[in-house]
Amino acid sequence: MLSNNSFFKPTPLYKEFMILDLIEKNKNITQREMSIAIGSAVSMVNNFLDEYEQKGYIKRKYLSTKTVEYFVTKNGKERRKLLNIWYFKSSQIVYQSAKDNIISFLNQIIERGFKKILLYGAGEVAEIMLQVIQSDERIPLEIVAVVDDDHSKLDEVIVNKKIISNNQIPDYQHDGILISSYTHHKSIYEKLLKKQYNVNKIIQFFD
C-alpha cells in the first residue's frame, strides 16, 4: 500500500482508491483502521465515506450504534478499477522519468570510457541500476559484481550479481567502481582512497 511508502504522500484520489479497496477486502473494517491506513483523521474518513455513499460507491449496514458493515457497490467497484488504472499510469510516468535519469548518468559513464564496473553498496540504488541495465540491452555497460561492507550479505545475489567484500575487489577484472550508496557514499569513497584505489576510477552517483 502507498501509505507504507515514506516517499509518497497519498493524494485525495489515491485515498479514495485505498478506502474502496480496504472496504472491498474487509466489510467489517473500522473507520479508525481506515484512518491509519490512509494517514488521515477519523473525522476526515467519515467525511469521505459520506461523500462516497452519496455518489453511490458504497453502502453502510448498521448492526448497532457502533458496529457498521461497509459494502462497495457495482459503481464503486468500477470506480476503484478506474482509479487503479490512473494510479498505474501515473506510476509509469514517474518510473520512466527516473529510468531516463539513470540511463543518462550511465551513458555519461560510458562516454568516459568505462565498460566493466563494480557497484559499491548492495542497496536499493544498486538494485534499481541493475534492473535498468538488465531491461535495456542498448546500455553497453557490464556490472561485474556488487561490493558491500555488510558481511551478512556476502555471497548473496542482487539482480543476478554476486555480492563481494572490498577485499575481493582485486579479484575481479574491472575498470571502475561506481559508489551506489547514498547513506555511506562518503565513507566508501574514503575507504577506497585508503586502499590506494585509483581516484580516477571512482565514480560517484551522489556527489
Image (tube, rainbow, N blue to C red):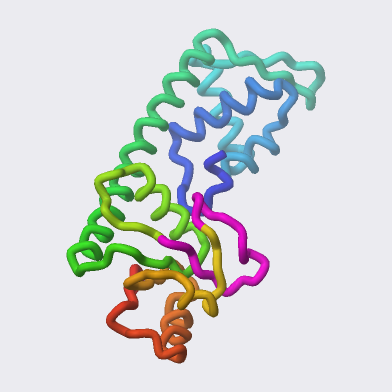
- The structure residue drawn at horizontal position 61% and vertical position 71%, both measured from the top left corner, is 150
- The structure residue drawn at horizontal position 47% and vertical position 63%, both measured from the top left corner, is 145
Residue 47: quadrant of the picture:
top right
Residue 156 highlighted magenta (yes or no):
yes
- The structure residue drawn at horizontal position 53% and vertical position 59%, both measured from the top left corner, is 162
Q: Is residue 182 visible?
A: no
Tell me: residue 97, above or below residue 26. Answer: below
Image location (x, y in percent) of residue 105: 26, 60
Along the viewing direction, whichever of 62 and 184 lies nearer the viewer: 184
- The structure residue drawn at horizontal position 58% and vertical position 16%, both measured from the top left corner, is 58
Tell me: residue 69, above or below residue 32. Answer: above
Along the viewing direction, whichever of 126 and 35 lies nearer the viewer: 126
Q: Name the quadrant of the C terminus.
A: bottom left
Q: In this image, 160 relative to 89: left or right?
A: right
Residue 88: quadrant of the picture:
top left
Residue 179 highlighted magenta (yes or no):
no
Q: Residue furthest left?
A: 111
Tell me: residue 74, above or below residue 91. Answer: above
Task: Tell me the magenta residue range.
Answer: 144-161
Image location (x, y in percent) of residue 92: 35, 37
Image location (x, y in percent) of residue 93: 31, 39
Q: In this image, 48 relative to 186: left or right?
A: right
Q: Is residue 147 visible?
A: yes
Along the viewing direction, whichever of 29 and 97 lies nearer the viewer: 97
Image location (x, y in percent) of residue 73: 57, 10
Q: Name the quadrant of the N terminus.
A: top right
Tell me: residue 23, above or below residue 187. Answer: above
